[in-house]
Amino acid sequence: MDVLQISVAALPFLVSLASRSSKAIAPCLLASIFTVLLGEEPHRAVLAWCVGVLIAAVALRERLRAT
């Protein structure tokens, strides 16, 4: 994997850092790690990435709703 692919894989983790609670950080970090590890199998990597993005988006939406 090159740098661009790793930075896209880390996107759920980076978005979860902007959330208000820290409950979403660990699952998003795991999803990002699984995305990198499953990079050789694109379908599984996309599934892990989508789950991480979904968790991060919900956490970010809750932060924006609270303000």
Image: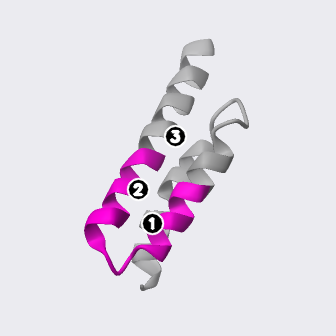
Q: Nearer the viewer, residue 63 or 54?
A: 54
| Residue that badge 2 annotates | 49
Label 1 secondary element: helix
| Residue that badge 3 annotates | 56
Q: Position of residue 53 (x, y in %)?
A: 44, 46
Judge the density around disc 3: few (<14), some (14-19), many (≥20) Cα neighbours within 10 Å. Answer: many
Label 3 secondary element: helix
**Residue 65 visible here:** yes
Label 2 secondary element: helix
Looking at the rendered image, the quarter that the N terminus falls into is: bottom left
Q: Quadrant of residue 8?
A: bottom left
Q: Main secondary structure of the magenta part?
A: helix
Q: In this view, which residue lies farthest toward the right?
A: 22
| Residue that badge 1 annotates | 35
Circles 1 and 2, Cβ within 8 Å, touching? The answer is yes
Looking at the rendered image, the quarter that the C terminus falls into is: top right
Looking at the rendered structure, the kind of residue marked 3 is Ala
Q: Nearer the viewer, residue 67 or 23?
A: 23
Specify which label sits upstream in the sequence, 1 or 2: 1
Residue shown at 71%/31% (left/top)? 21
